[in-house]
Image (tube, rainbow, N blue to C red):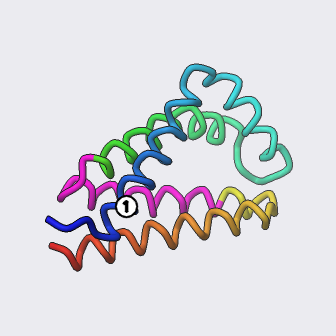
Amino acid sequence: MRFKAIHLLRIGLGINMLMHGLVRIPNLSGFVTKASGGFANTPMPPALVSGFLNVLPFIEALIGLLILIGGKIGRIGYIAGGLLITVLIFGTDLHQDWATTSQQMIYLLTFAVALYLHDREV
């Protein structure tokens, strides 16, 4: 089997998402405290923000793992990753952090391209 663009994208995106989650889990309370501060002046209820941020690293790690596994499971990871980034874009837009939104749009595009390439390969 030839090494294709989707393989490179799967490995890089999978490791990136896995590590996003894994590095946050050991200091989960610190991550939640730091990240929730940006939502103080938004209409989001603090309990909802805190609840979401407490599960976010686990979701990120799971998505990364799914992508790294590849195949049909990887496809689920690409879709879940794109949906997660869409939720993060919504939250980032609430506190008007347009620079971070731009970075998140790159992630969204990356998930979309990965899904497209995956579907073409099957």
Q: Main secondary structure of the magenta part?
A: helix
Q: Looking at the picture, how far across and down is residue 55, in whole percent?
A: 50, 35
Q: Could you tell whether 67 is left or right of 35 in the image?
A: left
Tell me the amino acid under the disc marked 1.
Leu
Q: Image quadrant of residue 75? A: bottom left
Tell me the quarter of the image containing the C terminus: bottom left
Q: Residue at x 78, y 46 (%)?
A: 39
Q: Residue at x 49, y 56 (%)?
A: 84
Q: Nearer the viewer, residue 107 or 96?
A: 107
Q: Could you tell whether 68 is left or right of 111 in the image?
A: left
Tell me the quarter of the image containing the N terminus: bottom left
Q: Looking at the picture, how far across and down is residue 71, in whole percent?
A: 18, 57
Q: Residue at x 73, y 39 (%)?
A: 35
Any magenta on residue 1? no
Q: Residue furthest front?
A: 2
Q: Could you tell whether 41 is left or right of 52 in the image?
A: right
Q: Residue at x 67, y 31 (%)?
A: 32
Q: Looking at the picture, how far across and down is residue 119, in whole percent?
A: 23, 75
Identify whether 111 is placed above or below 54. below
Start and end of the magenta stretch?
69-90
Q: Which residue is mark 1?
A: 8
Q: Image quadrant of residue 62? A: top left
Any magenta on residue 80? yes
Q: Nearer the viewer, residue 85 or 21?
A: 21
Q: Residues within 10 Å of mark 1 (few under 14, many from 20)?
A: few
Q: Nearer the viewer, residue 90 or 119?
A: 119
Q: Nearer the viewer, residue 45 or 6?
A: 6
Identify whether 33 is placed above or below 96. above
Q: Residue furthest right?
A: 41
Q: Secondary structure at mark 1?
A: helix
